[in-house]
Amino acid sequence: MLINIKSLLGFSLGATDGEIGKIEEFYFDDKTWAIRYLVVKTGSWLTGRTVLISPQAIQSPDWEKRELHVNLTRDQISNSPDTDTHKPISHQHEIALYEHYAWQPYWASGFYSGGQWGVMPATPLFTERINDADSTKMQTADNDQHLRSSERITGYHIHASDGDIGHVNDFIIDGKTWQILYFVIDTHNWIGGKKVLIPVENIKEMQWEKFKVIVDISIAAVKDCKLFDEAEYRLEENADLPTAKR
């Protein structure tokens, strides 16, 4: 099942004992393209806090009601570590989140996703405590952030091998693995308003300070990429997509 991220915005997230809030955006890993967290704005029950929920917690979707259900209680969520989404998410904060929820850490186990809608049974955070060397390594890694916001990267310019060709409009994810597979590129100011799909394999570099995505294909190849039809990815199964031409 391939889904565009924008169609998931506004979905309700339901705990085992009531609604948590609405999905506002997603955090993804810019090295593996895995969705790491759903960013959820809670309602009045939690004074509008923003919380991070791993795809591991998702149990089942209700497409008709636009709801995702998680194996967490409202009490667990209300007692979770505070998150400031206006600042980079540090590894220390991730460790605190994973310990609180007893999630399997992706950095320790190689877990990225899997199972029904990326669900894995909750397991103890560590079979062994992280040793001092691993802890130091994680703290040092705070200076090399790889978690990125789907909302903030929307609008970044796309630079092909021979010039600019559009900007990021959306993302296509695999609904079973929570992996970003394609960037949706709006070429409105370049080739007449078409939106095309560029596979993440064609992304050569992310220039965050310049708000630019560098791809390793030409403008002509971008024009030949599969056109994006939003209805095709709105929570419906579809065929595999071709890779971009060189």
Image (cartoon, grey):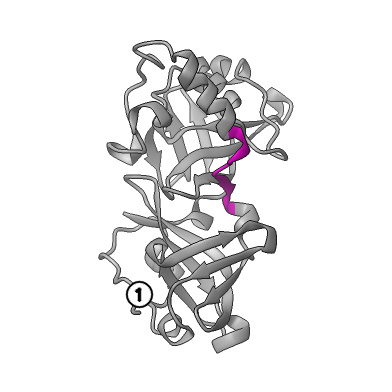
Q: Residue at x 34, y 12 (%)?
A: 127
Q: Magenta segment: does it hold 195? A: no
Mark 1 — residue? 244
Q: Secondary structure at mark 1?
A: loop
Q: Compared with residue 115, is residue 151 higher up or lower down, i.e. above or below?
A: below
103 or 71, nearer to the observer: 103
Q: Is residue 200 left or right of residue 206?
A: left
Total numbered labels: 1
206 or 54, nearer to the observer: 206
Which residue in the rendered view is the most extreme toward the front?
133
Report the span colored magenta: 142-150
Q: Compared with residue 84, is residue 76 higher up or lower down, i.e. above or below?
A: above
- Residue 86 at x, y = what percent? 72, 40
Q: Compared with residue 189, is residue 17 higher up or lower down, i.e. above or below?
A: above
- Residue 1 at x, y = what percent? 31, 54
Q: Quadrant of the C terminus?
A: bottom left
